[in-house]
Amino acid sequence: MNTKYKRHQKVKLLQAPDPEDVEYHTENLANEEAAQTTPIEAGMLGEINVILQNGTYHVKILDDKGQELAYAPFDEDSLEAAD
C-alpha cells in the first residue's frame, strides 16, 4: 500500500477528529479531567503512530509542550506534513 505519510512523521491536523474517536492519553498528566476537556482542533501537531490496513492513520496528538495528549484516527486528506 502506498501511503503519503510514514510512521513517526510529524503532521499538522487540518481538521478536528470526531470526538467519539478520540482516545485521551492521561498516564503522564497530573489532571485527567483537564486533559479530557482540552479540545482537539485543526492546526494542532501530531505524529503518525500506526498506519491502519484501511489506509487510515492513527495519530498521536501532541499538546503545545510536545507531550502526548490523545490518539485519534485521520484520513490522508485531514493531515499535512509538519516539517
Image: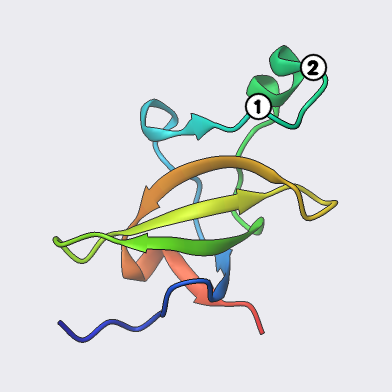
Query: What is the distance, in whole Å, between disc 2 and disc 1 at their CAs?
Result: 8 Å
Q: Where does residue 76 sit, x and y in percent of width and height?
A: 33, 70
Residue at the image position 43 percent from the left and 44 percent from the top: 72
Asked if 64 appears above or below 40 in the picture, the reply is below
Asked if 8 appears above or below 41 in the picture, the reply is below
Q: Amino acid at mark 1?
A: Thr
> Which of the image's four quarters has the C terminus?
bottom right
Q: Where does residue 26 sit, x and y in percent of width and height?
A: 65, 26
Q: Quadrant of residue 49?
A: bottom left
Q: Amino acid at mark 2?
A: Asn
Q: Quadrant of residue 20?
A: top left
Q: Nearer the viewer, residue 63 or 39?
A: 63
Query: Which residue in the structure is indicated by mark 2?
Result: 31
34 sits to left or right of 70: right
Residue at the image position 53 percent from the left and 76 percent from the top: 9
Residue at the image position 14 percent from the left and 61 percent from the top: 54
Total tally of numbered discs in the picture: 2
Q: Which mark is residue 26?
A: 1
Residue at the outermost top position:
33
